[in-house]
Amino acid sequence: MGSSNSPRVAFVGGGNMARSLIGGLVRTGAPTDTITVAEPNDALRQALAADFGVATFADNVAACAQAEVIVLAVKPQVMRPVCEGLCGIVQKNRPLLLSIAAGIRIDQLSGWAGGGAAVVRSMPNTPALIGAGATGLCANAETSAEQRAIATTILGATGLTVWIDNENQMDVVTALSGSGPAYFFLLVEALEEAAVAQGLPRDAARALATQTALGAGRMLREDGETPSRLRERVTSPGGTTQAALDAFARGGLRELVATAVDAATLRGRELSAASGA
Ligand SMILES: NC(=O)C1=CN([C@@H]2O[C@H](COP(=O)(O)OP(=O)(O)OC[C@H]3O[C@@H](n4cnc5c(N)ncnc54)[C@H](OP(=O)(O)O)[C@@H]3O)[C@@H](O)[C@H]2O)C=CC1
Ligand SMILES: O=C(O)[C@@H]1CCC=N1
């Protein structure tokens, strides 16, 4: 962003994910007077105003009054009343609705806001906080090419963006990259515990596990080789890595990962079903 034609963006919900997206926008040069935030928590409002210089509101409609884009950044469980409360302003001004909520479908968002709205459903992740996010996005037919480009700019300010054509696949995106950081954190936790159990001091175990995760992640992105080829390069025949990988295989690691992703995908579908049509 960062020009006089930056769109006016209102965030509804000023929690963790909204903070990371606002930070990305401000870092990449969006004028702070184009950003407003609605957030019920007084302390959060004050922190957002102090940290980013954006205007904050306790009232959702007031925050969205001038917005060309409304970023819906509340929990899935409160999305319905939030959209219903914005119905009047959406029908009057026809802003783009840009949701980051897990599970909630485009037709639900549009219907709750009175119908006919341009809607982009997206799924960012917490590395957005440090500009290393990964976001899947999906638009409905009412969304113009210009609005898609705006959505790409907003989410792209925090990292990689990937457009998904089939909305049904957004629950898989949620299960993969939305929840995914937690899977890698869990693996690092488990590696640290295992090394401590073998006698390594905790500080050393955490530092080595953390740097190994970073190094492996950078190789995945920068080396150009497939994950399986990179794994093979570490694995000397009859060596230590092979012994560990055999133990993972005996424990059914791949099947367990598939079961976990399936559970997260199903949970996304349950979240939308629980909110009604
Ligand atoms: N955390 C993650 O890793 C990811 C989360 N998401 C999605 O992002 C969304 C937000 O998650 P996250 O930032 O973690 O959650 P947070 O709870 O940190 O943020 C949500 C904010 O919305 C506020 N809020 C509650 N009700 C309303 C309302 N009626 N109007 C306006 N604001 C309201 C909450 O206030 P209060 O706390 O006072 O209720 C809270 O500050 C969710 O839909 C989630 O599915 C997407 C990708 C990754
Ligand atoms: O756990 C959740 O439901 C949210 C969505 C993806 C990451 N956190």
Image (cartoon, grey):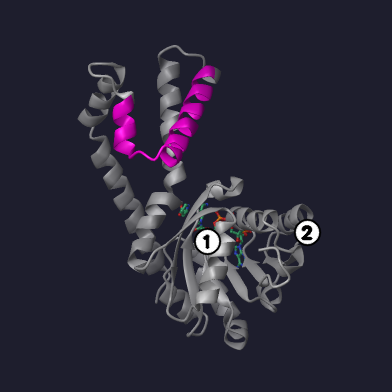
Q: Is residue 61 left or right of residue 154?
A: right
* Quadrant where the image shows the C terminus: bottom left
Q: Main secondary structure of the magenta part?
A: helix
**Amino acid of disc 1:** Lys
Label of residue 75 in the image: 1
Q: Is residue 136 left or right of residue 269?
A: right
Residue 119 seen = yes
Q: Is residue 58 left or right of residue 138?
A: right
At x 53%, y 23%, the residue is 207
Q: Residues within 10 Å of mark 2 (few under 14, many from 20)?
A: some
Closer to us: 105 or 208: 208
Q: Quote the CA–CA distance across marks 1 and 2.
A: 24 Å
The quarter of the displayed image where residue 192 is located = top left
At x 35%, y 38%, the residue is 225
Per the rendered image, the range of residues in magenta is 204-233
**Amino acid of disc 2:** Gly
At x 49%, y 33%, the residue is 214
The quarter of the displayed image where residue 151 is located = bottom right
* Quadrant where the image shows the N terminus: bottom right
Determine whether 228 is above or below 62 in the image: above
- Asked whether mark 1 and ligand 1 are closer than 8 Å, the reply comes as yes
Numbered disc 1: secondary structure? loop
